[in-house]
Amino acid sequence: MQTLSHRTAMIFSRKNTASALTAAAATAVVALTASPCAVAAFSTTRGVIVPSSRIRSRRGCRPPSFATGAPLRAATTTTTEGGVDTDPVLPSFSTKEEYVSYLKAAGKLPSGFAVGTATGEFVSVEAPAMGKLPIKATVIHLTEGPTDSWAAVFTSNKFPGCPVKVGKSRLSGGHALQALVINNKISNVCPGGDGIAAAELVCDAVATSLNLSGGANSVLPSSTGVIGWRLPAKELAEDIVPTAIEALQTESAFAAAEAIMTTDRYPKLRSKTLSDGTRIVGVAKGAGMIEPNMATMLGYIMTDAMIEKSKLQSMLTEACDRSFNSISIDGDESTSDTVVAIASGLKPLSSEDEFRSALLEVTGGLSADLVRNGEGTGHVIRVAISNFPGSEYDARRMGRHLVNSPLVKCAISGNDPNTGRIAGAIGSFMGKFFPDESVDDMSLTLGGRTIFDNGKFVLEGDAVERELSGHMANAQLGEHDDFPRHQSFVEIGVDFGGSTGSDVTVLGSDLTKEYVVVNADYRS
């Protein structure tokens, strides 16, 4: 996916801001990423209220707080008037059921939103011998009418998906939105048929079923999955989407987090309630083709705050740079990346600073979750770069060069402290792109221990070898786990010395046999 800077950004909202990041949140928020985003914002106007008689509200059934006696850190979820929030740094979990319960408790939708999902089947025109394949649809509905207060950031890939083209058209046309529709399994990218017409057919089905005053133009589509296959628009429009609309409910965003997954092993959801009661809830998917500019990912951020468009524009751009544009799993950029923020505008916002911090916390948490949930991920690598002799953009490039090194990835996968590979990757980047910059004062740490300083490695003794290998082993995840057991990282520090320069953080993952297995048989 492309960095938010290179993408067209669109803003949904009404007047917003959210809670300040705690110190723990800072560890989850990834460092600012590259390039500048083109952002277009629209002023907030109250749309016609379209009641949704199909929505089942179960407001009286609020899930209890969830806490787990985690071996690394116990959960400290906070119950507020808006519901239960996720922790800035998630606790440890011992079972999938604990994780799911935690997210369900924290997934209370902001006011003015409803979510519905459904599963169906289709037969691919391109590969009919594969038989019937499953596909899911998700509908997010603004129950109180359309909003002009929305924003989105799209991939900058030169072969964007047809839904991305439709979304950019919605943006440039200044259309208000009242619904989002997302399907998995098929990305609708450069298909043999008319992919734009297929996406519009699905949007029209949503608008017709919900009786939206703005018609198909008030629906934003997204697709993720196999590239090159035709979207089964007829099945989606006539069967799956109407069923998802029948399932609309105003209680939780968890169903959406589950339904948008492809090769994801578990759902990803983050939430934050501000002191004034306004709420931000975000869901995201992505496990492979993860590389800024954004990663292969879809992200949807819902808020009931009223927020001024220029403020939201600035906040969303910053949040994306510091999160989704600072991660990499495999170095491949996607054709379908979309991050959307949309506001129902039902609650006044008392602090823009608090909203900004909350948005950073939600996007930072989701981006870290994407890496931890990467295809075949066995370790999450966190690279903290200090005093880089260049811009933050270039510092992130160096960080991604390091975490994308196959040699570094494989060493970490095997808990092998082959530290020369880390220095080699850094030296390769600096020699190619910053040949005139000195690295004489550079120092490296692994797991907090200095491993390189004054131009020499500091690695003498078996005890150091065991310590470094143990640090990697302690951060290891199960490649097949269907929930995140812990939030540990393989910690790499790169300090170029001095007191000036750029400081960033980049997340990446190792390279395992399971990654190859998943991507060797992706379509089935």
Image: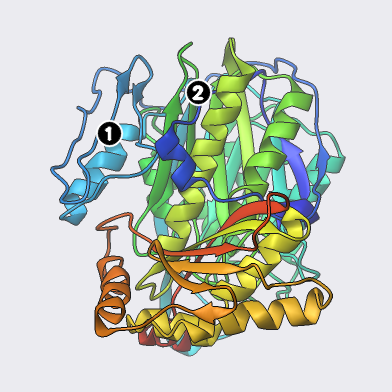
Report x, y in % for residue 454: 58, 73
Report x, y in % for residue 400: 62, 69
Tell me, for residue 19, which label it has, or none: 2
- Res 45 visible: yes
Q: Secondary structure at mark 2?
A: loop
Nearest the viewer among 412 and 287 is: 412
Nearest the viewer among 343 and 504 is: 504
Residue receiving disc 1: 105
Q: How many marks?
A: 2
Q: Secondary structure at mark 1?
A: helix
Report x, y in % for residue 67: 18, 36
The image quadrant of residue 348 is: top right
N-terminal of the pair, mark 1 or mark 2, is: 2
Q: Residue at x 32, y 44 (%)?
A: 90
Protein image colouring:
rainbow
Q: Label 1 sits on what residue type?
A: Ala
Nearest the viewer among 113 and 327 is: 327
- Quadrant of the drawing holding the C terminus: bottom left
